[in-house]
Image (cartoon, rainbow, N blue to C red):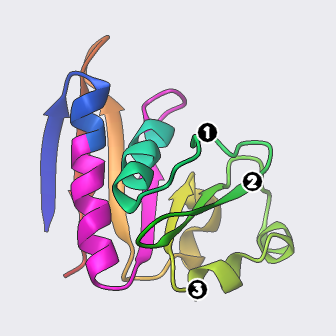
């Protein structure tokens, strides 16, 4: 099932992300993939999820760190950016498989870099600019 949302500001993005994070935390976590062009709002969406989980420190793009871990009040958040990775060896080096099996909410930017390894149970979020200010956020849940 896919739902689509049009957002005009960061507050709307955070609200939609928070709703998803709360729902996933209630079921013990899982994997969320975030697709979209550079600057589309993937990290902004992750910030909204982190806030809902009670993460206190700032959430920034892990482009160069590749993986950032955050402790929340309700659940741990793992934020991955696979943009700079080039194959299975790189995924193995960052502990990709261990993160997927952890009891956390795992958020993956640029999931197409690991497409065949993303679990079928992953929630897929696609973010696209509709104009200078607005974004379309499509959320596909496998259940």
Q: Quadrant of the C terminus?
A: bottom left
Q: Earlier in the sequence, mark 1 or mark 2?
A: 1
Residue 17, percent across and down? Answer: 30, 50
At x 15%, y 60%, the residue is 2
Estimate the spatial distance between the alpha carbons at disc 1 and disc 3, rounded to whole Å: 21 Å
Q: Which residue is mark 2?
A: 66
The circle on residue 102 is 3
Horizontally, residue 53 falls left or right of residue 61, namely left
Going from the N terminus, do you reach mark 2 or mark 3 first?
Answer: 2
User: Measured along the vertical axis of the image, is residue 63 above or below residue 132?
Assistant: below
Q: Secondary structure at mark 3?
A: loop
Quarter of the rendering occupied by the N terminus: bottom left
x then y, percent, for residue 114 = 62, 67
Q: Residue at x 68, y 47 (%)?
A: 83
Question: Is disc 2 in contact with disc 3, using a CB cutoff of under 8 Å?
Answer: no
Q: Work out which residue is located at the far top of the displayed protein and give it.
A: 132
Residue 36 visible here = no
The residue indicated by pointer 1 is 60
Q: CA distance from mark 2 to mark 3?
A: 17 Å
Q: Is residue 18 left or right of residue 53?
A: left
Q: Is residue 52 magenta?
A: no
Side (left or right) of 27 relative to 1: right
Range of the magenta residues? 15-41
Q: Residue at x 21, y 57 (%)?
A: 19
């Amino acid at each position: 099932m896919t739902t689509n949302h049009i957002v005009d500001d960061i507050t709307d993005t955070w609200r939609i992300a928070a709703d998803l994070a709360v729902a996933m935390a209630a079921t013990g976590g899982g994997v969320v993939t975030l697709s979209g062009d550079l600057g589309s709002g993937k990290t902004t969406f992750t910030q909204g999820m982190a806030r809902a989980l009670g993460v206190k420190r700032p959430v920034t793009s892990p482009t160069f760190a590749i993986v950032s871990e955050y402790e929340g009040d309700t659940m741990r958040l793992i934020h991955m950016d696979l943009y700079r990775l080039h194959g299975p060896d790189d995924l193995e080096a960052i502990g990709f498989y261990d993160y997927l099996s952890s009891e956390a909410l795992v958020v993956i930017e640029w999931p197409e870099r690991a497409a065949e390894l993303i679990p079928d149970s992953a929630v897929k979020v696609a973010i696209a600019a509709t104009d200078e200010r607005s974004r379309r956020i499509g959320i596909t849940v496998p259940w």
